[in-house]
Image (cartoon, rainbow, N blue to C red):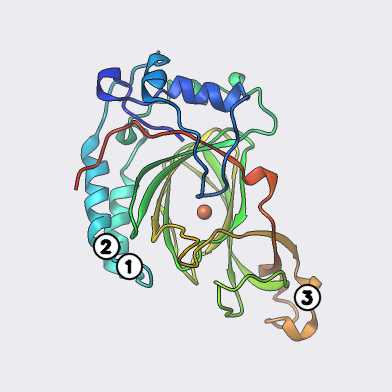
C-alpha cells in the first residue's frame, strides 16, 4: 500500500518507488497478512525516487478518522457500539486516495508495469497503538490476501480504489479462538461479492460480519483498514490462515444445518501461512496524524 503525500519536502511517499518494488521484484518478501516483517527503506532514498507529485492532500479526513479511533477503541475485549460504528463508517465512506496522499496517476495503477507473477500485496502502516491500527494495502490486479481471521477484532475496510472480490465467513460453532486447531470447522458464508470503489465501508466483528475473509483484486486496488485492536501474538490475536473445503467434508454430527441449506456453509481447516500471504512492507510517509 502506499500513501503519502508526494511532496518531497513534506515527506511524501514514493508511489513510483513502491510500485517499482511491487512490480519489478527482487524486493525481499516479508511477513504475512497484517503482520509484516520489516525491511524498511531509508526515507531519503525513497524520496529521491519520487517523480509523480500528488496534487491534493486532505489531511483533515485522516486526522478525523484518527481522533475517532482514539475515542472508539478502548483496548482488547471491547467491541464498538453501533453509534461508534456509524461514526467511523461515515468518515471512512468519504475518504479517498487523496486523503492518504495518493493519486490515480501513480504507476501502481498502470497494469503494464505488472511483471511479477504472482503479484504481491504491499502494505504500510499509517499508525499503530495497542488499541487500534490504520493500514493501507495495495493489491495489483489478480493479487490475493488469502483466507485469514481477525481474532477478537473489529475491522473496518474501505476500498479506496479498484474492484475486489471479497469472500467472508463466520464460525458456526464457538471455539476459543486463541486455541490453534487443524480440525475442520463449519462456517457460514456472509459475503461473496465484488465491490467496486466508491463503495461503503465493510465492517466485521469478532464473531459476526464475516470475521474470516479473503480479498482478490480484479483491478489494482487500495484498501484502508482500521483494526481494533491490532493483531498481537502476545495477546492471543495472531493471524491464522485457512483452506476451504466443501460442507460435506465434515461429519454429520458436526453439521449445523438441515439438508437443503448447505449452500451457505463450508468448512475450514487451519493451514500454515500460504505463499500468497507474503507481502512487501513499505514505510509510510504520507500525511501524519497527530494526537
Ligand atoms: Fe483481513
Q: Earlier in the sequence, mark 1 or mark 2?
A: 2
Q: Earlier in the sequence, mark 2 or mark 3?
A: 2
Residue 122 position, x and y percent, is: 52, 36
Dot 1 beta carbon under 8 Å from ligand 1: no
The vertical placement of 218 against 202, above or below, is above
User: Splitting the image into 4 quarters, where does residue 177 fall?
Assistant: bottom right
Give 262 or 146, whichever is nearer the viewer.
Answer: 146
Whether tag 2 and tag 3 are in contact, CB under 8 A, the answer is no
Q: CA distance from mark 1 to mark 3?
A: 34 Å
Q: Earlier in the sequence, mark 1 or mark 3?
A: 1
Q: Residues within 10 Å of mark 3 (few under 14, many from 20)?
A: some
Q: Residue at x 23, y 36 (%)?
A: 59
Mark 2, residue position: 72
The vertical placement of 288 against 258, above or below, is above
Residue 114 position, x and y percent, is: 62, 24
The vertical placement of 67 against 116, above or below, is below
User: Splitting the image into 4 quarters, where does residue 250 fall?
Assistant: bottom right
Helix, strand or loop at disc 1? loop
Mark 3, residue position: 250
Helix, strand or loop at disc 3? loop
User: Splitting the image into 4 quarters, where does residue 14 fall?
Assistant: top left
Whether tag 1 and tag 2 are in contact, CB under 8 A, the answer is yes
Mark 1, residue position: 80
Q: Residue at x 62, y 46 (%)?
A: 277
Q: CA distance from mark 2 to mark 3?
A: 39 Å
Q: CA distance from mark 1 to mark 2?
A: 6 Å
Give 175 or 94, whichever is nearer the viewer.
Answer: 175
Q: Residues within 10 Å of mark 2 (few under 14, many from 20)?
A: many
Amino acid at each position: 500500500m502506499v500513501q503519502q503525500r508526494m511532496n518531497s519536502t513534506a515527506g511524501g511517499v514514493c508511489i513510483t518507488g513502491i510500485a517499482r518494488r511491487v512490480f519489478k521484484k527482487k524486493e525481499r518478501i516479508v511477513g504475512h497478512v497484517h503482520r509484516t516483517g520489516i525491511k524498511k527503506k531509508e526515507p531519503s532514498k525513497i524520496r529521491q525516487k519520487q517523480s509523480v507529485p500528488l496534487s491534493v492532500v486532505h489531511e483533515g479526513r485522516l486526522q478525523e478518522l484518527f481522533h475517532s479511533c482514539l475515542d472508539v477503541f478502548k483496548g482488547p475485549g471491547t467491541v464498538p457500539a453501533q453509534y461508534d460504528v456509524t461514526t467511523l463508517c461515515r468518515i471512512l465512506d468519504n475518504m479517498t486516495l487523496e486523503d492518504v496522499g495518493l493519486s490515480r496517476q501513480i504507476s501502481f495503477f498502470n497494469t503494464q508495469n505488472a511483471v511479477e507473477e504472482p503479484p504481491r500485496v504491499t502494505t504500510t502502516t499509517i499508525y499503530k497503538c495497542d488499541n487500534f491500527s490504520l493500514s493501507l494495502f495495495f493489491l495489483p490486479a489478480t493479487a490475493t490476501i488469502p483466507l485469514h481471521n481477525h481474532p477478537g477484532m473489529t475491522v473496518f475496510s474501505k476500498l479506496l480504489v479498484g474492484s475486489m472480490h471479497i469472500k467472508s465467513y463466520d464460525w458456526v460453532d464457538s471455539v476459543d479462538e486463541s486455541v490453534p486447531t487443524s480440525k475442520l470447522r463449519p462456517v457460514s458464508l456472509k459475503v461473496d461479492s465484488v465491490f467496486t470503489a466508491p463503495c461503503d465501508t465493510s465492517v466485521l466483528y469478532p464473531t459476526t460480519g464475516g470475521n474470516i475473509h479473503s480479498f482478490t483484486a480484479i483491478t489494482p486496488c487500495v484498501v484502508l483498514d482500521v483494526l481494533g485492536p491490532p493483531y498481537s501474538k502476545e495477546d492471543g490475536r495472531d493471524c491464522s490462515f485457512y483452506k476451504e473445503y466443501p460442507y460435506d467434508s465434515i461429519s454429520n454430527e458436526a453439521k449445523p444445518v438441515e439438508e437443503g441449506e448447505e449452500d451457505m456453509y463450508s468448512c475450514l481447516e487451519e493451514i500454515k501461512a500460504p505463499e500468497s500471504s507474503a507481502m512487501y512492507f513499505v514505510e509510510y510517509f504520507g500525511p501524519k496524524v497527530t494526537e
